Image (spheres, helix red, strand yellow):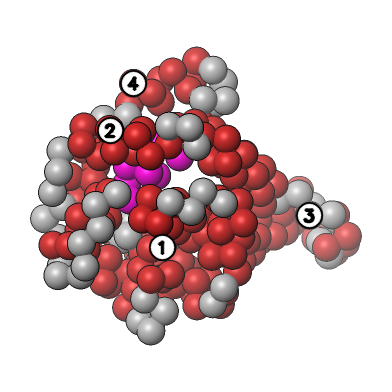
Amino acid sequence: MRTNQDYKNAALDALRGNWAPFVIGTLVFAVIALVCSGGNAAPQFIQPSAGSGTGLILGLCSISFLLTLFVVNPMIVGYDNAMRVFREKGDADFLHNMFQFATSNYLHKVLGMFLMELKITLWTFLFVIPGIIMSFAYAMTPYILEEHPEIGAWEASTRSREMMKGHKFDLFWLYLSFIGWVILCILTFGIGLLWLSPYISAAEIGFYNDLKAEQGEPAVTP
């Protein structure tokens, strides 16, 4: 495994001169995620008999859950793998690739992401810390769902956990190395995330490819 600075330098080198499609793609993804998580469905989808505030909240939460399950989660797979093909093949058509990866083999990705989140939730029920640790263990699931469609939806997150053995803290440390940029993004009222998110994603691809090489898959050094 390389150092955090190696991953970050390689990510910046790749993105230099290519920021526009990734900033636009990140903005589109953010808008979709915001709308879906906001439970903005029209009131007519909520039964009138649920007329209480509690019924309204439950209805909105249910709609938000379904939108996250069927829209946001596949888009996460699309976002991650659109960045992967850019780092590995130089394909910068990010927005097109994001939607293509999100919609191809669609139900497999929906189920795979749902099962990944279910596993994390069950670990969280034990205690918060195990849930956080397992979120790092399952972090490579979106890539595996796309690169290995022959693997079952349940097994995809299991494969990620196996790949991440001994490397969960490494990934945490990589994320933590961006803390200064996160603070700057807060100062820009979140606007800076349009640049930071592709930066982190591009660095994570290098980490993922080193994991694959460690597992004996063909080495790619983006």
**Residue hosting label 3:** 41
Q: Nearer the viewer, mark 3 or mark 4?
A: 4
Q: Within 10 angstroms of label 4, few (less than 14), some, or many (20 or more) residues? A: few
User: Upstream in the sequence, badge 3 or badge 4?
Assistant: 3
**Residue hosting label 4:** 180
Q: Nearer the viewer, mark 1 or mark 3?
A: 1
Q: Secondary structure under badge 3?
A: loop
C-alpha distance separating marks 1 and 3: 27 Å
Q: Nearer the viewer, mark 2 or mark 1?
A: 2
Magenta stretch holds residue 198: yes
Instruction: Inspect the image, locate mark 4, and give the three-letter code of the amino acid beneath it.
Output: Gly
Instruction: Inspect the image, locate mark 1, and give the three-letter code of the amino acid beneath it.
Output: Pro
**Residue hosting label 2:** 9
C-alpha distance separating marks 2 and 1: 23 Å
Question: What range is drawn magenta here?
Answer: 197-205
**Residue hosting label 1:** 142
Q: Secondary structure under badge 2?
A: helix
